[in-house]
Amino acid sequence: MKPRLLTPGPTPVPEETLLDLAKPVVFHRTPEFRQALAEVLADLQYVFQTKNLVLPLTSSGTGGLEAAVANCIPPGKKAICLIAGRFGERWRGLCKAFGIEPIAVTVPYGEAVAPEQLAKALADHPDAVAVCCTLSETSTGVAHDVAAFGRLVAPTPALLLVDSISGLGAMECRTDDWHIDVNITGSQKALMLPPGLAFLSVSAKAWAAIEANTQARVFYFDLKKARAALQTSDTPYTPAHTLIMALRHSLKRIRAEGIENVWARQALHARAARAGFQAMGLKLFAARPADGLTVVRMPEGIDSTTLLGKLEKRYGLKLANGQDQLKGKIIRLAHMGYIDQFDILAALAGVELVLREMGHPVDPGVGVAAAQRVFAEAVSAAGGRS
Ligand SMILES: *Cc1c(COP(=O)(O)O)cnc(C)c1O
């Protein structure tokens, strides 16, 4: 049986990257590594669509979120947290941990925070110094209209901090055009690497706030120290340099394809996955679905924990369950990064087989056919080009 990792983090890693990771470990304070780091950070500027400095951190994605909060927001200040799921809640938890007052703007799981809700929160709290949100809320599969958030936040003194960990490289994200002050991602989602690295882009407005924040409770995650080291393409502490070297392969892939083509391909994957599940009679969980993953509700009487267990045991298909109160109620299929259209078809075929086994009526192939139709239409729309 062939295992297929189809979870929204970690995601599969391309073969050439795996081979790179199998090489002997070298020392990191060398001209070769500095050059690799400089190259990676320049290519990341392209993936982020930013002219701002991108900083690497050796941590999981949450370390990047913590660095953003701890450096940019002084203790005792207010931050508006847009909460549509677990990762929005993580922003609130981080604010509390650093003595910042979170102003929560919450919507039920499955819905997206509307720009009007942010506009009201900004009007009610003109003293808020930051707005924290997710681009893709991985716990529910919802995408936020970050471009609209940026238009609202840019004219205010507040900073826009975006957790785009499952969104960057998986859907349109224009850091500079959308006025994102700190944009954070991790290595193990659309960047096609194992976990272990976080990256943040920091705008001039955010650097001004960081420099003015004399009470920042930071040591390892001190972004000023990281910026100073980067002047010589170095890092303050030992970086996960084998991952940084390996990241060159993913970034070359993205550059070769072109970021807008990557976004279009991811959007196509998302459309196909949605069509496939809906043709099986399953309902989408997200009112405003993201492109990097698709989340669907289980039909009456089907427990997703049982379904996912069978999918993995019988067919090697590893999809994700819901978290906390959504456990057993939804399934989450990732289609970002190195997951291709045939992985999506495999996942849909497996879900059909297991649903039938569990007594839910599904005609074999209905979901697969609906997804195939979406792929086929994209081929004809392109007019057989390339
Ligand atoms: C995966 C993910 C995280 C990340 O976390 P880790 O610290 O790398 O486990 C945070 N936010 C979002 C939206 C994610 O999808």
Image: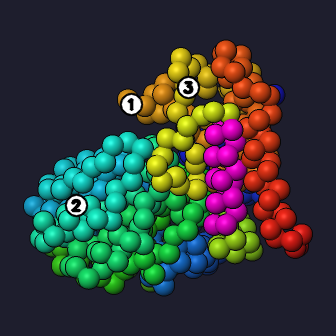
Residue pointed to by mark 1: 324
Q: Nearer the viewer, mark 2 or mark 3?
A: 3
Q: How many marks?
A: 3
Q: For the residue carrying disc 3, how many other residues have a C-alpha within 10 Å: few (<14), some (14-19), or many (20+)?
A: some
Q: Nearer the viewer, mark 3 or mark 1?
A: 3
Residue 17's x, y, as percent? Answer: 72, 57
- Vertical side of 84 occupied by 72: above or below: below
Q: Mark 3 and mark 1: span between their CA atoms?
A: 19 Å
Q: Are marks 1 and 2 in contact (CB under 8 Å)?
A: no
- Give me the residue at 53% from left, 63% from top: 168
Residue 87's x, y, as percent? Answer: 38, 48
Residue 347's x, y, as percent? Answer: 72, 37
Task: Report helix, strand or loop for mark 3.
Answer: loop
Q: For the residue carrying disc 1, how many other residues have a C-alpha within 10 Å: few (<14), some (14-19), or many (20+)?
A: few
**Left or right for 199, reference 129:** right
Residue range of the region highlighted in magenta in the rendering: 263-279
Q: Residue 77 appears in which quarter of the rendering?
A: bottom left
Task: Report helix, strand or loop for mark 2.
Answer: strand
Q: Do the residues labelled 2 and 3 touch (CB within 8 Å)?
A: no
Q: Mark 2 and mark 3: span between their CA atoms?
A: 36 Å
Question: What amino acid is found at the position of numbered circle 1 in the picture?
Answer: Asp
Question: What amino acid is found at the position of numbered circle 2 in the picture?
Answer: Ile
Task: Report helix, strand or loop for mark 1.
Answer: helix
- Give me the residue at 75% from left, 53% from top: 374
Residue pointed to by mark 3: 299
Q: Mark 1 and mark 2: span between their CA atoms?
A: 24 Å
Residue pointed to by mark 2: 80
**Left or right for 72, reference 31:** left
Looking at the image, is mark 1 or mark 2 earlier in the sequence? 2
